[in-house]
Amino acid sequence: MQSNEIPPTIKTVLVLDDNFIIAMDAEEILTSLGVAEVHVATNAEQALEMATAHSIDFALIDVNLDSDTSFVVADALIARGIMVGFTSGYGESFPSPQHLRSIPRIDKPFSETTIGSLIAAAYDQRGP
């Protein structure tokens, strides 16, 4: 698999970002990478509702939402067996809880290559 290719089992992705323009950019990139369905949420409530209503294979979560909201959502999705990756405009300086530090993270602005690599890394961590 090339660095910007995603595993073929990743068909539905949830994007959680409170900036709608960034979320739509992620949706466009994911579609160009071959993701069949992308669901965009701009807050935790929407994200959790979408995860309940749809079969989500992967979630791309902005690490900088209200307080620890992104981490609460990540924990809830992981508990459901959904792979998670974080995006951040703060690089590694944005602290995450110890148990979530192993989750792959990419910096904004992202690209096909960085999103593809993030999904591939999460998939490799979890295993097929």
Image (tube, grey):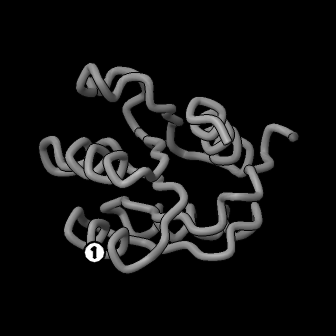
**Relative depth, front residue between 27 and 100:** 100
Residue 86 or 72: which is nearer the viewer?
72
Residue at x 45%, y 62% (from the top left corner): 15
Label 1 sits on a secondary structure element that is helix
Task: Using residue 31 as the reference point, say whether residue 78 is left or right of it.
Answer: left
Q: Mark 1: which amino acid?
A: Glu
Seen from this angle, which residue lies furthest bottom?
53
* Residue shown at the point (23%, 62%) measured from the top left: 44
Task: Please tell me whether residue 70 is drawn above or below residue 18 in the rendered image.
Answer: above
> On the image, which quarter does residue 4 sit in?
top right
> In the image as oriented, which residue stretches furthest toward the left?
67
**In the depicted structure, whether residue 19 falls above or below residue 72:** below
Quadrant (top left, top right, bottom left, bottom right) of the C terminus = top right
Q: Give x and y (percent) for residue 84.
A: 45, 45
Left or right, residue 9 beside residue 74: right
The quadrant the N terminus occupies is: top right
Q: Position of residue 9 (x, y in %)?
A: 70, 58
Which of the 4 image quadrants contains residue 96? top left
Image quadrant in which you'd find residue 34: bottom right
Q: How many marks?
A: 1
Residue density around tag 1, few if under 14, some if 14–19, many if 20 or more, within 10 Å: few
Query: What residue do we see at 68% from left, 67% from top?
Result: 35
Q: Hey, which residue is sitting farthest right in the picture?
A: 2
Please report the residue visible at 65 percent of the width from the left and 67 percent of the height from the top: 11
Q: Which residue is mark 1?
A: 49
